[in-house]
Amino acid sequence: MEIVAENTLRAIRFERPEHIPVVFWINPACWRHYERETLFDLMAAHPLLFPDFDRAAFAMPELAPWERAGSPYTDAWGCLWETSDDGITGAVTRHPLADWDALSHFSPPDPAQTNGVLAIDWSAEKQQTSRATEKGQSCSASLEHGHTFLRLSYLRGYENLLFDMADDEPRLQRLIGDVQAFGVGLVQRYVDLGVAMMCYPEDLGMQIGPMLSPAMFRRYIAPVYRSLVAPAREAGCLIHMHSDGDVRDLADDLLACGMDALNLQDLVNGIDWIAAHLKGRVCIDLDIDRQDVTRFGTPAQIDALIRDAVVKLGDPKGGLMMIYGLYPGVPIDNVRALMDAFERYAGHYA
């Protein structure tokens, strides 16, 4: 769980935040690819993005088990993860249910013990929320990234899963039920702890179009999403959904599942399209381009990109947040330009 700022909650609720919430996330691999002091200097120079940064006390991020090169990791579902670069999330290289015959002796994990990828101590989670409440703070909680559609693909393999959907494979419904029950178990536990926001991260898009058809999404995945959202919605939690890729064909279906905030990518979906179809309907948590302008453009082009997003998607009432994930390969001058632009335009409506 994480502490969620009141300003973020106000942006999602369209309650006139003090500024546009902005997040600059540094992938753990960056600490191997950039000079540490260079990143430290940039963080120290941008207090809005890194308000609690203390150079002397800064703790280097610990790699997750599935981010360690040369160390294959098996998660609680039995999926094997491998990566070639420390800090970069790996790919599933062994699908435990690639052969349906394995389903007869397959048991899903227990949400009382794990979140699907790591063990979870619910007593510690309760202590964290209690401490936050005592300080007048709010907490957000999240399902694992890839909680439903991707989890099914991890278990069966992507191509197998799409054929299962097309063939109306009866055993798929049992597997969906297992995934759904696990996710609902996690959500209900977080809701019982009193979190203010539940997050549902799952990539559904490709460079062009979604990874499954809207019809298949509505038939197989949307019902699970609604069941995962229902306990949180009933408890008054805000609902945050994330997906990378082109999700324009699924956007209306996602909103129908009860989302308050939708984290989607800017250029692959198009800022103009996002403004025309989503502005005012949902809080847009804009994921800033990592493939084109920020990697290969100039600082001036980066500044123009952020300004364009704020002008077209922002509003004094709220409804806009922005996030950027820094990965190795972005020139330092561009990193600086991004940080400067985030801080410059976050106060555009203040």
Image (cartoon, rainbow, N blue to C red):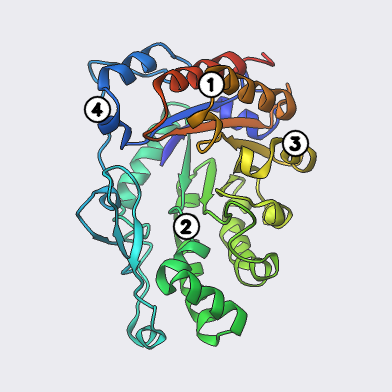
Residues under numbered marks 4 and 1 in contact, where contact means CB atoms less than 8 Å apart: no
Residue at figure coordinates x 65%, y 52% from the top left = 247
Q: CA distance from mark 2 to mark 3?
A: 28 Å
Q: Name which residue lies at 61% across and 17% down.
A: 345
Single out the mark in the foreground, 2 or 3. Answer: 3
Q: What residue type is disc 1 on?
A: Thr
**How much space separates mark 2 and mark 4, taking CA atoms?**
28 Å
Name the residue: 53% across, 21% down: 298
Q: Nearer the viewer, residue 175 or 137?
A: 175
Res 104 label: none
Residue picked out by circle 3: 272
The quadrant the C terminus occupies is: top right
Would you identify the image quadrant in which residue 96 lies? bottom left
Mark 4 highlights which residue?
59
Q: Nearer the viewer, mark 3 or mark 4?
A: 3
| 220 to the left or right of 101 | right
* Residue 66: x %, y % from top left: 29, 53
Q: Amino acid at mark 2?
A: Gly
Asked if the residues shown at circle 2 and circle 1 are in contact, with their CB atoms under 8 angstroms apart, the answer is no
Query: Which residue carries the number 1 mark?
Result: 298
- The amino acid sitting under disc 3 is Asp
| Image quarter hosting the N terminus | top left
Q: Secondary structure at mark 2?
A: loop
Up/down of 176 relative to 253, above or below: below
Q: Which residue is mark 2?
A: 146
Tell me which residue sits at (41%, 11%) in the image: 45
